[in-house]
Amino acid sequence: MQPLSESTFLVLLALTKEPLHGYGIIKKIEEYSGGDIVLAPGTLYGILTNLQKQKLIELVTAEKESRQKKIYRLTDDGQTSFLHEYDRLKKMLTISDDILEGAKKHENVQEVQNLFSE
């Protein structure tokens, strides 16, 4: 399975708790990121089209009285794909933390050695 783009991951994340329409997805991502990430509508709808083609999300309904708002939800494959990517990202962060902590320990050892060599 190929890694998901950041935007695709965020769209799947937004749909993990409940089905949403496009604007709801944009607002949920904004909320989750504290306003740091705002998806443009064109970007979002391209992602939604691709996710539908991959059968990771599905159209639940289109509300006729609300300018044809389309409501999307994760499929079982979409949930599996999201969780797989979530685990992959967690593993990458754990490895990064281990490497950075190791570098800090190495720097501390080097500093102590320098004190004794002066």
Image (spheres, rainbow, N blue to C red):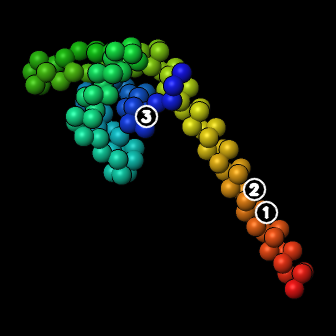
Q: Is residue 27 left or right of residue 89?
A: left
Residue 31 placed where, x, y %?
Answer: 35, 45
Q: CB under 8 Å between callouts 2 and 3?
A: no
Q: Which mark is residue 102?
A: 2
- Determine whether 107 is above or below 44 in the image: below
Left or right of 86, for residue 30: left
Q: Secondary structure at mark 2?
A: helix
SS of the residue under disc 3? loop
Going by the numbered disc 3, the residue's amino acid type is Ser
Residue at (12, 25) in percent of width and height = 66
Confirm whether residue 112 shows in the render: yes
Residue type at mark 1 is His
Instruction: Reply above or below: 54 against 37.
Output: above
In the rendered structure, the answer to whether residue 14 lies left or right of residue 49 reads right
At x 78%, y 69%, the residue is: 108
Tell me the residue that label 3 is attached to.
Answer: 5
